[in-house]
Image (cartoon, rainbow, N blue to C red):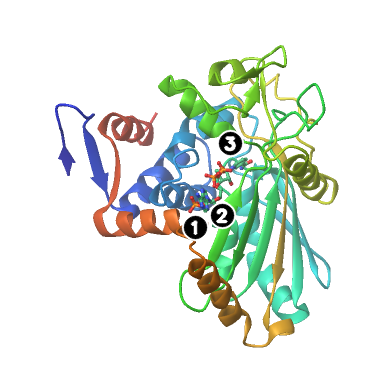
Amino acid sequence: MSHANAALPEVETLALADLTELLQRIFEQHGTSSEVAQVLAHNCASAQRDGAHSHGVFRIPGYLSSLASGWVDGRAVPVVEDVASGFVRVDAANGFAQPALAAARGLLVEKARSAGIAVLAIRNSHHFAALWPDVEPFAEEGLVALSVVNSMTCVVPHGAQRPLFGTNPIAFAAPRAGGEPIVFDLATSAIAHGDVQIAARQGQMLPEGMGVDSLGQPTRDPKAILNGGALLPFGGHKGSALSMMVELLSAALTGGNFSFEFDWSNHPGAQTPWTGQLLIVIDPSKTAGNHFASRSEALVQQMRGVGLQRMPGDRRYQERAKSLAEGITLPAAELARLRELASAR
Ligand SMILES: NC(=O)C1=CN([C@@H]2O[C@H](COP(=O)(O)OP(=O)(O)OC[C@H]3O[C@@H](n4cnc5c(N)ncnc54)[C@H](OP(=O)(O)O)[C@@H]3O)[C@@H](O)[C@H]2O)C=CC1
Ligand SMILES: O=C(O)C1=NCCCC1
């Protein structure tokens, strides 16, 4: 279905399953195994379905240029190790983080249910996506999940002069009795790198306080941030401390790279950070019996009761419901490019 309007670019609407299948073909055509293509396509289509514009199909060119550069292995087979009662370790073998998580997921859940808590340490991995798809499914199964991943040097630690940290998101998911899981997913930078790229492409200025130029001076110009400048942490020293924690948990604890440790200069086109990821999964029945979901619901109701209009996740769930009912709308030119990429090279 396509529709045009004199003032608006032509757009096309397609079903989630069709977008997923299209993305799977793209990945397969550009050097991934069909197993990896399936996981990445599902992840990327889910982000687009939920209106995550900086981490949906926007990311496809970056995935493909990284694959073409040889920086990441699209056919990597993750190696899962059962290291201790509450710990699972995965070497992603220089592949993407999501297939590594998929390979370890069953063991992780089994351990979380038996021990009450389990930790998954992924190393040697590339994460180029939104983080909430990694935690939300655990909450749908009644578990509480927290994940962190570090990215690439582009954030100046609070009080420092030069960038060191990545944009380092933290995602959390918890079950709730009266509705969709409570989920938040936030970069520890004042703005995600992807949103700076989108603003630069659209010729828009950023709000104050997001970044600095190459001389370390505050700027609202996304191009100045991307060309030699840097981002700032959110919330000054507080976001900076959280970003430091993400580096420690995602890299030092897993055996992955810190955001400043990898050098992709010999791989022109490389865009996927080669780092690590940590997930912690908790079975709330071990401490709260059957009460956790009703207690989290009570908290949500109290928050609504004091006037909260928007919970983290509300926007995504609304976008999701709309996409599932009406289909996913993309600019027709973008969809045409995706279809070209999906056809044989
Ligand atoms: N792989 C990687 O290395 C990286 C990935 N990312 C990804 O980038 C994405 C965007 O991150 P970021 O820009 O920080 O996200 P946002 O600032 O847009 O949102 C952060 C969280 O706050 C919620 N939220 C936003 N506005 C409000 C509001 N007014 N009231 C209540 N809740 C609100 C969002 O819910 P909702 O979703 O419903 O809007 C979301 O859970 C994330 O998915 C992240 O994982 C970022 C950095 C690096
Ligand atoms: O938006 C961001 O910030 C990032 N997203 C994917 C990985 C690199 C950083």
Assess mark 2: CB under 8 A from ligand 1? yes
Q: Which residue is rendered at x = 73% and y = 74% of the image?
A: 111
Q: Which residue is rendered at x = 58% and y = 22% of the image?
A: 269
Describe residue 319's horizontal placement relative to residue 170 as left or right: left
Assess mark 3: CB under 8 A from ligand 2? yes
How far is the residue under mark 1 from the one under mark 3? 17 Å
| In the foreground, 188 or 101 | 188
Within 10 angstroms of label 3, few (less than 14), some, or many (20 or more) residues?
A: some
Residue 237: in sight, yes or no?
yes
Q: Which residue is rendered at x = 54% and y = 21% of the image?
A: 222
- Farthest-out residue, top: 215
Residue 169 placement (x, y as % from top left)? 65, 46
Assess mark 1: CB under 8 A from ligand 1? yes
Q: Mark 2 points at which residue?
A: 132
Describe residue 320's horizontal placement relative to residue 284 as left or right: left
Residues marked 1 and 2 touching at CB (< 8 Å): yes
Q: Which of marks 1 and 2 is nearer the N terminus?
A: 2
Q: What element carries label 2?
A: helix
Q: How many marks?
A: 3
Residue 315 placement (x, y as % from top left)? 43, 54
Q: Mark 1 points at which residue?
A: 313
Question: Which of the image's four quarters has the C terminus?
Answer: top left
Q: What element carries label 3?
A: loop
Q: Which residue is rendered at x = 69% and y = 13% of the image?
A: 214
Residue 113 placement (x, y as % from top left)? 70, 79
Q: Name the residue under label 3.
A: 192
